[in-house]
Amino acid sequence: MATKASRTAARLMISPAVILLFAWMIVPLVLTLYFSFLRYNLLTPSGNPFVGFENYYWFLTDPSFTAAAVNTLLLVGGVLLITVIGGILFALLLDRPMFGQGIIRIMVIAPFFVMPTVSALVWKNMFMNPVNGIFGRIATGLGFEPIDFFGNMPLGAITIIVAWQWLPFATLILLTALQSLDQEQLEASEMDGANWLNRFWYIMLPHLARAITVVILIQTIFLLSVFAEILVTTNGGPGTASTTLTYLVYVASLLQYDVGMGSAGGVVAVVLANIVAIFLMRMIGKNLDA
C-alpha cells in the first residue's frame, strides 16, 4: 500500500508540469491543423470557409517548394559535414595537453552562446561584405577579386555561418566522448607498432561513433528550423537560392498574410522533420545495439 500511495503522490506532484507541457505543445498544434483547412487570408477576409486539403495542395505544388526542400537538405547536410569533421579535429586537438588549454576550450565553445541574429550580422558585415569585409580586404590585398558571398553563393554562406555556430556543440560532445576512451588501449596499440592514423581509424573513430550519431540527431532536429540567419542575410534570395521550408512558411504566413497556407506549410514541415527524426533515431538504435 505504501508503494502504491507513493506512486500516486508522485503522479499528482508531476501532473501540473505534464499538463502545462501538454497544453503548450498540443494547443498550438491543434490550432495550426485547424487553420490549415481554412481559406484564411488576413488581407481578404471572407468568413474563413473550410477548404479541406486545398492549402496543402497549393503549398506542395508551389514552384518554390521543391527549391526550398532541396535547399533545406543541402543546408542540413553541409552543416553536419562541417561540424562532424571539424568537431572531430577540434576534439583531437583539445584532448592534447597544451598551454592555456582551459582558455582555448572556452574560446572554442563561445560561438555556441552567440544569438543567431548577432552572428549572422557579424558574418554579413564584418567578414563576408565584398567591400568592407575582412575576406574582401584579404582578397583585394592578394590581388584577387572579392567574392560576393551572399550574391554568388548565398546558401553556402549561410551554411558557413550556421556551421560556425554549431561547431562548438559538436566539439564539446565529441571531446567528452574522446576523454572517456581507455588510454591503456591506445598505449597498448602504440606498443604493438600501430601508427597514429591506425589508432585513430581503428580505435578512436569507432569509440566516437555513438557520439557522432547523437550529434547528427540533435543538430538535424534544430537545423531543419534554421530561420534567423536567412532572414538577416539574404531574405531567401536571390530568388529562391537560399529559401528553406521554414522561410517559405514565414513568407506565406507573415509576408503574404495567408494564415491557412502558412499553417499547412508548418504542418508539412513538422511531418517532414518527424520523418527525419524517426529515421535518425532508428539509425542510432541500430548503432547502439551493435
Image (cartoon, rainbow, N blue to C red):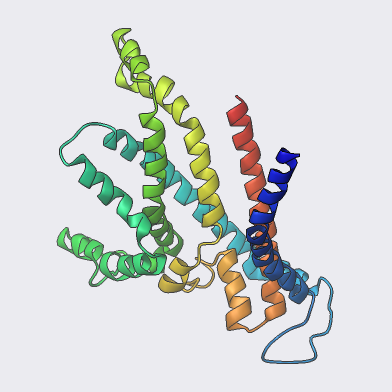
Specify whether 248 is left or right of 181: right
Q: Position of residue 33 (x, y in %)?
A: 75, 70
- Up/down of 123 relative to 252, above or below: above
Location of residue 100 by image quarter: top left
- Quadrant of image for the N terminus: top right
Front-lying residue, 125 or 46: 46
Front-lying residue, 175 or 267: 175
Front-lying residue, 85 or 15: 15
- Quadrant of image for the C terminus: top right
> Is residue 64 at all visible to an observer of this figure?
yes
Q: Position of residue 97 (x, y in %)?
A: 21, 32
Q: Position of residue 42 (x, y in %)?
A: 67, 88
* Residue under the point 84% across and 80% down: 50
- Up/down of 97 relative to 267, above or below: above
> Is residue 264 at all visible to an observer of this figure?
no
Number of marks present in the image shown: 0
Specify whether 157 is left or right of 220: left
* Residue under the point 55% across and 45% down: 217
* Residue under the point 75% across and 73% down: 36
- Up/down of 179 relative to 65, above or below: above
- Up/down of 281 relative to 155, above or below: above
* Residue under the point 54% across and 69% down: 240
Which residue sits furthest front? Answer: 2
Specify whether 219 is left or right of 167: right
Location of residue 89 by image quarter: top left
Q: Position of residue 20 (x, y in %)?
A: 65, 64
